[in-house]
Amino acid sequence: MNLTLSLKSLATFLLSASYAFFPTPSHAEENQSNTPFKATSALYSSLIEGSKTNEAMLTLFLNQMPKGGDLHHHYSGTLYAETYLDWVKEKKWLIDPTTLHIIKKDADQKDSLLSVDQVRADNTLYRKLLSLWSDKDFWNHNHPQSPPDKQFFSTFSYFSPVMDEYTERGLQLIKQRALAENVSYIETMLTEMGVYQLFLEQKKYLSYNQSLRQAQSQDEIHTILSQVKKQLLATPAFTLRIDHYISNLEKYHQSIDSEDFTMRYQSYALRVIDPMPVFKDLLAAFIAANQSELVVGVNILGPENNLTALKDYSLHMQMFNYLSGEYPKVKKSIHAGELTIGMVRPKSLKFHIREARKIAGADRIGHGIDLMYEKDSPELLQDLKENAAIEINLSSNQFILGVKGLRHPYLIYSDYGVPIVISSDDSGVSRNNLSHEYVLLATRYQPSYSQIKKYVYNSITYSFLDEKNKARLTTQLDTRFRAFEQKMAKLQTLKLAP
Ligand SMILES: [Zn+2]
């Protein structure tokens, strides 16, 4: 592990050194007076100064602004409930009016079930469906509510039957939405392998689960994982699913990349299931990322306060540690520290980000909200500053954890120089977009225009793209910012004109 990490530190140093050779013309312009940069910066400052921020104008400004990449992005959580409903209609599936779940039966087996058109014709039922399939109207009016984190994660159970049916079109929709708000790169979490469902012989499966949970040392865990890995690689159904996943992605991806837009993928494991299926998913994800240029990283996700996720957290990090040794080139982003006081016992707030870095070797941390409670957080901050980046998801943190404003660690990360990227998480469930995440950032914390611009460039620098594509998208950002700043400078003139 130490060797892997020190090689990684060297790679990080070389990477940052190589970035010194990509001059950003915008930085040169920042030193000149009366440049479009200065006018844009002045306009932005006027919107956040004083006791009242001009949120409407900020929204206009940040919608127009180039936003580079969205690095914390879930494919299934990004599509809106309305889109999923279109697909249910196309499949001629039905909706159960009591539960509002999708029923995979067609019209002649209707009974008491409703067609999508019938649901849409009943405004009350339709509104109720949107409020269950997304976070819509959760805070707007009084109604029986489940806890917000449960509401958020349960939305997936409503649209999951249809979410993998039209992936190619879903990706196209995401691309169109990205282009419409000046986003040039998306790194989306998408996996359709389902290898967790492939069971080893039941007795063996239970015994592996048990021995992994009881293992006393890293060596013991590695020995068990290497036995399981050997068996899985000798199972044709396992390797076949990885091959299918890659060839499907290649098919979906054919018309995605264009001159003005690039997309890449992360595969992942769900953390709320037994150790064996988690390891199967992680192994398949590492292999896919190792084989395919489209799969640029691996992640682990799901509610971190789930009982199994809490119980097995350290074991999952050990799995990352083992697989990092086996596939050292694979990049890792890890959902870690998406927890807060009151949600779990204090002891669970002490080590998640730390282990994601020190044991799993995460290149990026998703959320990182429990930083303040972590053991030796000053030392952790220094490590994050030097070796990782943090993915900030303001809407999602506010909804799921109730953490916002000065309770959010954004200011710590920003004040101590940890590289920050702003991302959207699940913009379909949150009914949001990346521009609005920047609006929240600007209204809450008033970062300078230069700081915001830095976050946009970070979203390419800390992406898992290869160096050639990073250089290409950085140059593209320079051009986009030049055009944007000229447009904003012109807008200022318009305002001052009599
Ligand atoms: Zn996420």
Image (tube, rainbow, N blue to C red):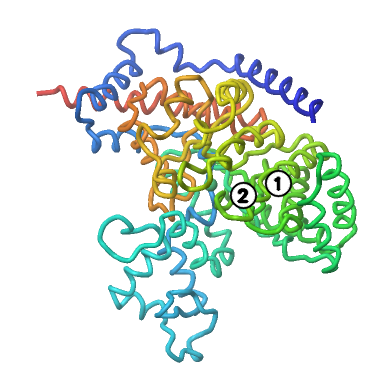
Q: Identify the disc placed on residue 185.
A: none
Q: Which residue is mark 2?
A: 310
- Secondary structure beneath label 2: helix
Task: State the residue in front, 383 or 325.
Answer: 383
Amino acid, disc 1: His
Q: Which residue is mark 1?
A: 316
**Quadrant of the rendered structure where residue 133 is?**
bottom left
Q: For marks 2 and 1, give the CA distance.
A: 10 Å
Distance from mark 2 CB to nearest ligand 1 atom below 8 Å = no
* Viewer can see residue 206: yes
Name the residue located 58 percent from the left edge and 18 percent from the top edge.
22
Q: Classify 10 Å Cα crowding around label 2: few (below 14), some (14-19), many (20 and above).
A: some
Left or right of 444? Residue 338 is: right
User: Between tags 2 and 1, which lies in front?
Assistant: 2
How many numbered marks have been drawn onto this rendered protein structure? 2
Amino acid, disc 2: Leu
Name the residue located 23 percent from the left edge and 31 percent from the top edge.
53
